[in-house]
Image (tube, helix red, strand yellow):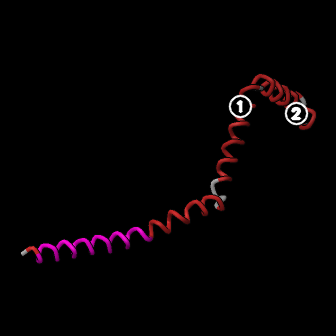
Amino acid sequence: MDNIIEQKERTESKKMTESTCIISEPISELLSEEPKSLMTDNKGIGVVEIILILVVIIGLVLIFRNQITSIVTDALNAVTENSDVIIN
């Protein structure tokens, strides 16, 4: 009876070891390759740069809002006043 129990335990232990090896090999390969791919992958850099550029532009617009508004208003007023000359 003890022999049968020991054989079952050994069989189960073997199965668990085999399944663990099967699972752990791809994981270990992924873990060893991931840092290398992160260091050489430049796909996300473009997105970060675009976001930073947008943040800078929005900040500049907020800082110089009054000056930008006055420049645009003056330009539109000049175009409106001189439109008669262009039309005639």
Q: Residue at x 68, y 53 (%)?
A: 46
The label shown at residue 80 is none
Residue 15 in the image, given as x and y percentages of width and height: 27, 74
**Residue 79 vertical placement versus 26 (above, below):** above
Pick out the residue farthest to the front. 2
The residue nearer to you, when weighing 11 against 58, is 11
What is the quadrant of residue 16 in the picture?
A: bottom left
**Residue 79 vertical placement versus 53 (above, below):** above
Q: Which of marks 1 and 2 is nearer the N terminus?
A: 1
Q: Which amino acid does label 1 sit on?
A: Gly
Q: What residue type is labelled 2?
A: Ser
Residue ID for mark 2? 83
Residue 76 in the image, given as x and y percentages of width and height: 82, 30
The kind of secondary structure element at disc 1 is: helix
* Quarter of the image where the C terminus is located: top right
Badge 1 density bin: few <14, some 14–19, many ≥20, Cα 10 Å: few
The residue nearer to you, when weighing 38 against 43, is 38
- The magenta stretch is 3-25
Magenta stretch, overall SS: helix
From the viewer's perspective, is 28 left or right of 72? Answer: left
The kind of secondary structure element at disc 2 is: helix
Pick out the residue farthest to the left. 1
Residue 9 sits inside the magenta stretch? yes
Q: Residue at x 72, y 42 (%)?
A: 53
Q: Residue at x 17, y 77 (%)?
A: 7
Residue 86 sits inside the magenta stretch? no
From the viewer's perspective, is 79 left or right of 32? Answer: right
The label shown at residue 59 is 1
Q: How far apart are marks 1 and 2 (CA)?
A: 34 Å
Badge 2 density bin: few <14, some 14–19, many ≥20, Cα 10 Å: few
Residue 19 in the image, given as x and y percentages of width and height: 32, 72
Question: Which mark is in front, 1 or 2?
Answer: 1
